[in-house]
Amino acid sequence: MNLPEGYTVWDVVNHLETREDIILYLEAASEEDAGDGSIIRMAIKDVARAQNMSALAQHLGMSRAGLYKALSPNGNPSFATIMRLTRALGMQVILRPMPSDQPHPEETPEPAETETRSPTPSVG
């Protein structure tokens, strides 16, 4: 990538320096995730990169490439992999109720169905 002189590529990994940085980053990713896991998965990947991806992969009994693949946008890591990875990062997954200002999926109204009718033939 060719950047104009004086510019550098910004990478969040360079800013995840303390445990508090990591906690705040993962909390923000969890809050912003739409429910498909894509944002939190990428945040976990960023934290893993900041904490030495190769060492984490070895600790998990995976290859570095396998861990990158699992955490890639097209990856689909098992829940067990996520649990082992978060523990290896010194974290734990905690489930808590959503804030009351966000509707529970069962309380979200479904879109109204639109009725499609065939044109009535004219009698002539």
Image (cartoon, rainbow, N blue to C red):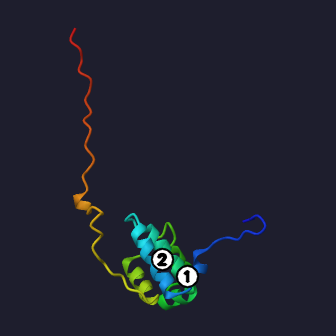
* Amino acid marked by disc 1: Leu
Q: Which mark is residue 25?
A: 2
Residue 44 rendering spot, x and y as whole percentages: 48, 77
* Residue at 44% in and 84% down: 85
User: If the image is split into quadrants, where does the N terminus sit?
Assistant: bottom right
* Badge 2: residue crowd in 10 Å (few <14, some 14–19, many ≥20): some
Please tell me whether mark 2 sits on a helix, a strand or a loop. Answer: helix
Badge 1 marks a residue whose secondary structure is loop
Q: Residue at x 26, y 38 (%)?
A: 114
Tell me if label 2 and label 1 are in contact, CB under 8 Å.
yes
Q: Can see residue 76? A: no
Q: Is residue 97 left or right of residue 54?
A: left
Separation of marks 2 and 1 at Cα, in angstroms? 8 Å
Question: Which residue occupies the foreground of this view, 101 or 38?
Answer: 101
As drawn, which residue projects farthest toward the left?
123
The mark total stands at 2
Task: Choose between 78 and 86: the one closer to the eye.
Answer: 86
The residue tagged 1 is 16
Residue farthest top in this picture: 124
Q: Residue furthest front?
A: 101
- Quadrant where the C terminus lies? top left
Residue 46 in percent (x, y) is at: 53, 77
Can the viewer see residue 91? yes
The residue at 40%/72% (across/down) is: 30
Among the two numbered marks 2 and 1 on one chain, the one whose residue lies closer to the N terminus: 1
**What percent of the width, then of the height, locates residue 95?**
30, 78
Q: x, y (%) of residue 43?
A: 49, 74
Residue 13 sits in quarter: bottom right
The kind of residue tagged 2 is Tyr
Q: Is residue 104 above or below residue 111?
A: below
* Disc 1 packing (10 Å; few <14; some 14–19; many ≥20): some
Classify residue 50 by image quadrant: bottom right
